[in-house]
Image (spheres, helix red, strand yellow):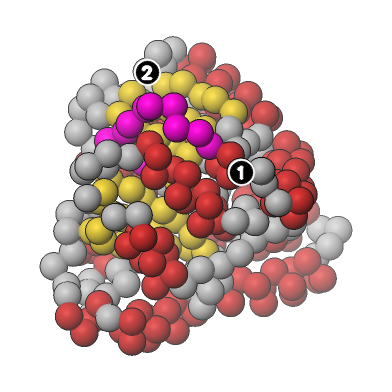
Amino acid sequence: MALKEEDVKIGSLVSDFYNESPFPGYDINKFIIKDDLYKNANIYSRLLHDQIPYGKSILDAGCGTGQLACLLSLKGRTVVGMDFTEKSLAKAKELKAKLKLDSASFRQANLLELKDTGERFDYIFCNGVLHHTNNPYLGFSNLMQFSKKGTLVVIGLYNKYGRMFLRLKRTWVNWRYVNDQQKKREAIQDMLVKDEEDCEKQDSWFDDQYSHPHELSHSIDELLGWYEKNQVEYVNSIPPIELFRKEGNAKMIFKKSPVNGWKNSRSAHILKQLGWIISLRETGGYYLIVGRKT
């Protein structure tokens, strides 16, 4: 089925944006040996690397500049990174070649036009990607073509409630510091490792969070509805979507949440998301939900 004109228009706009500012940006000189992939990774990426077993197959859909895909290709794992943007993929391939990562591969693909290639993966990741398309559910359902029984699926999106604080801050920063690049870099520090000195990384994060031409946001139950329609059962979430569940309890990313009943109901999700207006202000309202294909 052909894409709608608006889907194509938004896709081109987003692709042009990331060709100008590949994300996530980084200084490739910081990567000398393979161990540097872990050393320079964020907490989430390290948890994935620590918890995914040896030899598994992984699809990183919307891999951007490829640091996560390259990291996960260690320990005998096979990783396919897909992205729509040529310049981002070029940087990913450069990192792969520099570190001689034979088990990582990268290909250009539009998530809204994915065709079933017959490939099936043990893990599917789509981190912070679908909300930059004009039809996120179509992209999600296309990704499920690459799943099999037991595949662990991780989708990261902006939350409608949790994104509110950043939207207000973005309006202020873009007005107040329109020509002050250093102030823009300072504005993004909360979303990075404190005192991050990589200017390329700072600038790419600022562009992604404060200058992006298209973004949507999604509630917890909207994403859970996608899972249900595609026979994906809920496993876990970061941060927890359940009331009174401790943050540390969710750090075993692929372990089934022990919380059920009213603490994990629609009403509980609304209360949780209202709290995210404040608690997720430093991460821009970003959340992840893990599921398992049944």
x then y, percent, for residue 279: 43, 75
Instruction: Report the residue at 65% width, 72% height from top.
Output: 167
Asked if labels 1 and 2 touch by Cβ distance under 8 angstroms, the answer is no
Number of the label disc, if any, that sits on residue 289 = none
Instruction: Report the residue at 17% width, 58% height from top.
Output: 256
Q: How many residues crowd around disc 1 within 10 Å: few (fewer than 14), some, or many (20 or more)?
A: few
- Looking at the image, residue 206 lies above or below residue 110: below
x then y, percent, for residue 264: 25, 77
Number of the label disc, if any, that sits on residue 103 = 2
Tell me which amino acid carries mark 1: Met
Residue 214 visible in the shown view: yes
Tell me which amino acid carries mark 2: Ser
* Residue identified by numbered label 1: 1
- Looking at the image, residue 275 lies above or below residue 4: below
Instruction: Report the residue at 27% width, 81% height from top.
Output: 265
Q: Quadrant of residue 231?
A: bottom left
- In this orientation, which residue lies closer to the viewer: 39 or 102? 102
Prevailing secondary structure class for the magenta stretch in the rendered image: loop
Q: What stretch is highlighted in magenta?
A: 114-125
